Image (cartoon, helix red, strand yellow):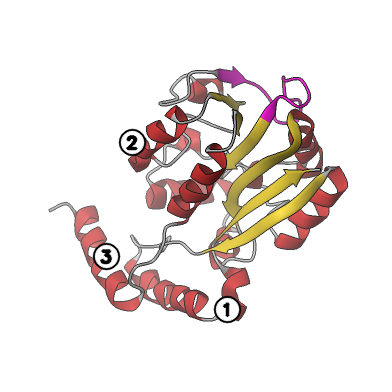
Amino acid sequence: MPLRDRIDAWSNTIQRRIAPDLPYSQSVYQERLRGYVSGAGRWLDLGCGHQVLPEWRGDEEQKLVGSAPFVVGLDADYDAIRRHRSISNLCHGDISRLPFRSESFDLVTANMVVEHLADPAAQFAEVARVLVPGGIFLFHTPNLRSYVIALAQLFPGPLKRRIAKFLDGRDMEDIYPTHYRANRDSEIRSIAERVGFAVSNVEFVLSGPSFSLLPPILIPELLWIRQLRQRPRFAKYRQTLICALKRT
């Protein structure tokens, strides 16, 4: 058995003992997204890359996209959208200047995109512009207060990208610069109020361990995740945020 597979098997065993039945934040996002897609006629997925959901959730993604009457994916990375596996209506564009008329969409989504926004106030305002009144902006993004981001910020960009490639198995071209300018509850609420959104929900979401391939770090990580799960006062330190903003 290859070394990586042996480490994965060991990590799964340890996780089942220390923090069993952990949710995965992408699964939680998928469930929240399904609820909003069911009521949306026109859906825009921002920073769509080449997929809406993670690589191993291809079947679920096809069903989700297939259930929507009209879906558009937008990304600044032309090579990425050329490889999109589920959305056929694709647009090469910039979130800061969305190439759509005002009030064009009922739902706008962004999965692990907001952390890359350099000017989230201006970019959220563009999202509000293309949403109909009462439309929803749903996004899933890392929580700046989480231990994962605290550790990531200790490393310079090039090294951080190599670590992400090793831990997540992502290609280097799929790893983009991060700014984390709308990755706290307070920042999101402040920006939302300024640009025409009401905050429907900000959810602090647990996920599985990030360092399962680094055994010396995995056990303390799982012990901390267990605390995040069991102690409500620690919820604000969970790994990700899922936010729903309503256009006023």
Q: Which mark is residue 59?
A: 2
Q: Do labels 1 and 2 touch, CB within 8 Å?
A: no
Q: Would you say the magenta stretch is mainly helix, strand or loop?
A: loop
Tell me residue 124's x, y (percent).
76, 40
Circle 3 residues within 10 Å: few <14, some 14–19, many ≥20: few
Comparing 244 with 77, the one in front is: 244
Task: Indicate the amino acid at tag 1.
Answer: Pro
Asked whether residue 178 is in view, the answer is no
Ranked by sequence position, the earlier of labels 1 and 2 is: 2
Q: Nearer the viewer, mark 3 or mark 2?
A: 2
Q: Which residues are magenta?
A: 90-105
Tell me residue 74's x, y (percent).
60, 26
Determine the residue positioned at 78% across, 24% down.
102
Q: Measured along the vertical axis of the image, is residue 216 above or below residue 82?
A: below
Distance between mark 3 and mark 1 Cα atoms: 25 Å
Q: Measured along the vertical axis of the image, is residue 154 above or below residue 77?
A: below
Check disc 3 and report the residue beneath it. Answer: 12
